[in-house]
Image (tube, rainbow, N blue to C red):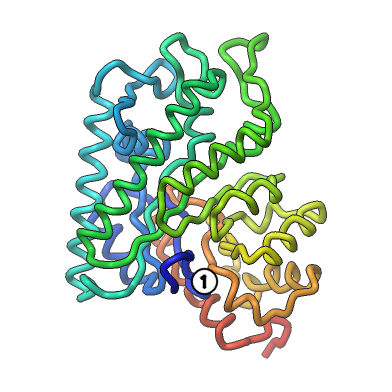
Amino acid sequence: MTDSRVPVGVATGVGSWPGTDPRSAAEIVVGELPGLPHLVELPDRGVGADLIGRAAALLVDMPLDTSTTGYRLAQRAGAATRAARDFLARDLDAFEEAWETAGLRGSDRPVKVQAVGPLTLAAHVELFGGHRVLTDRGALRDLTESLAEGVANHAADAARRLGSPVVVQIDEPSLPAVLAGSLPGVSILQPPPALPEPEALDLLQRAVETVGAPTAIHCCAPELPWNLLRRSGATMIGCDVSTLRTADLDGIGELLDAGVDLALGLVPTAVTEPAPGWRDLAEPATRLFDRLGFPRTLLASRVTVTPACGLAGASLDRARAALRSAAELTRAFADGADPSERR
């Protein structure tokens, strides 16, 4: 790892995790992901613990509260913001304990923290009148600045507590819908208009610059805007490999040519029978690089392996198995193993 990039050639999680116990989650993640463990989200705990709710603990001077349909900007910190802050503090305490128990405090082992991105947050948080923040350009800019400052503070706090380098993942699952204008509005006659790509790019660039730490942007939705992501300032882009189509190849190739790395979601989050081995899991990645004309050796030097998406909907056993499979796959890539060579 360098000071300016997200680690490659390692396995990591995407974000969410099953259950409600932050200590158990931290122990498993630190144990199963030696290359890049992550501070998980535990949405089963309820309001303030999900991807959007977590932002209530990060936003600076922009409190959130609940509405009848989700989260809404509020005049003052209410129950949702207090719950989110409490959950985040407990999660950090649990991770710090696991980190110290593993003897990693003060090491050069990196840790990843996640946060919802500004465009997805603006797509799911309401203004006081019920419309999405996305529909108000001024509020959208303010939300982006507040969130980015909060994420920078969060990353710095985690680095201080752990004594280790911290990288950041920005989650933008709604990015394609924001750009396409396909989000529902407060009525069928008032859908939010599509956000022009130059505006979206400017907001992401501002967020990445403000965060300061090495940053990845992750989106497990199909039809990713590869050109926008390549220019965002992030050093890594994460996706669910199962969503990729032929139309994505040029964008991915240009991304790699520009020096931006990939986090490939290669491990399914759902149970499949029989359970796939590393050869089956590696095949989409090797096929992708073959089609792009890149050597397979780059899978060890330009790729980080992840589950396809978050693991909150999986059983605890399945979630742990997914992390183990991701770690096994990175070892196979590092060893130059060829998945086409069957025993």
Q: Nearer the viewer, residue 18 or 220?
A: 220
Residue at image position (69%, 79%) is 296
Kind of element beneath mark 1 = loop
Image coords of residue 283 (percent x, y): 69, 72
Rendering quarter of residue 80: top left
Which quarter of the rendering shows the N terminus?
A: bottom left
Q: Nearer the viewer, residue 277 or 245?
A: 245
The outermost residue toward the bottom is: 343
Image coords of residue 6 (percent x, y): 47, 64
Looking at the image, residue 99 lies above or below residue 205: below
Image coords of residue 230 (percent x, y): 65, 53
The answer to whether any part of residue 272 appears in the image is no
Residue type at mark 1 is Val
Does residue 82 appear to the left or right of 127 in the view shown? left
Residue at image position (42%, 23%) is 70
Disc 1 crowd, CA 10 A, few/some/many (<14, 14-19, 20+):
many
Does residue 245 appear to the left or right of 147 in the view shown? right
The answer to whether any part of residue 283 appears in the image is yes
Residue at image position (75%, 75%) is 294
Image coords of residue 11 (percent x, y): 47, 69
Which quarter of the rendering shows the C terminus?
A: bottom right
Looking at the image, residue 315 lies above or below residue 331: above
Does residue 67 appear to the left or right of 163 in the view shown? right
Looking at the image, residue 49 lies above or below residue 275: above
Q: Nearer the viewer, residue 241 or 100?
A: 100
Residue identifier under label 1: 8
Looking at the image, residue 297 lies above or below residue 174: below
